[in-house]
Amino acid sequence: MMPTVDQLVKLFTPIFGTVFIIMQIMQTKLLTKVKKVAVATHTLTNSATGAMLQAGLDDAMASSVLSHKLAELTNDPGYMAAATAADIKIVQRRKLLQDHLIQQATVDAQLVKEKTA
């Protein structure tokens, strides 16, 4: 005799419930791993960006020193203009670095908040 639909439902309901719970656990573990990788990637990228911005600022500062020295030694208007342009680059690059650091601090604070929640 074939089992009825009700009998089959009673038989398989606990199995399906268990399978569903196992799938939820697996999905949660996978999402946790994905989030850890995403946070690590984000941290690494921001660290590299900060280093790149700092190197750009350092380069602009060195260029400014050289340009000012050449302008001082030669009194050449071209070198004087280059020195002024180098000073502007310092201001611009310093702002880029500061903006990056502020944004990174905001992200870091959010990550700390999520970890403690």
Image: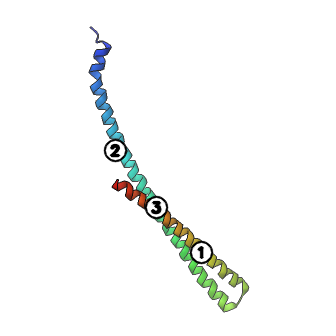
At horizontal 62% and vertical 74% (from top left) the residue drawn is 89
Picture coordinates of residue 18, whole percent (x, y)? 28, 31
Label 1 sits on residue: 91
Q: CA distance from mark 3 to mark 2?
A: 27 Å
Q: Is residue 105 left or right of residue 115?
A: right
Q: Earlier in the sequence, mark 2 or mark 1?
A: 2
Label 2 sits on residue: 29
Picture coordinates of residue 104, whole percent (x, y)? 47, 63
Picture coordinates of residue 109, whole percent (x, y)? 41, 61
Q: Residues within 10 Å of mark 3 (few under 14, many from 20)?
A: few
1 w.r.t. 23: above or below: above
Q: Secondary structure at mark 3?
A: helix
**Depth check, front residue: 107 or 64:** 107
Q: CA distance from mark 3 to mark 1?
A: 23 Å
Q: CA distance from mark 2 to mark 1?
A: 46 Å
Q: Nearer the viewer, mark 3 or mark 2?
A: 3
Which scheme is used to colour this image of the protein? rainbow
Label 3 sits on residue: 106
Q: Indicate the quadrant where residue 4 lies.
A: top left
Q: Secondary structure at mark 2?
A: helix
At horizontal 42% and vertical 61% (from top left) the residue drawn is 108
Q: Earlier in the sequence, mark 3 or mark 2?
A: 2
Most extreme residue toward the bottom is 73
Screen quadrant of the N terminus = top left
- The type of residue carrying mark 3 is Thr
Q: Is residue 33 left or right of residue 95?
A: left
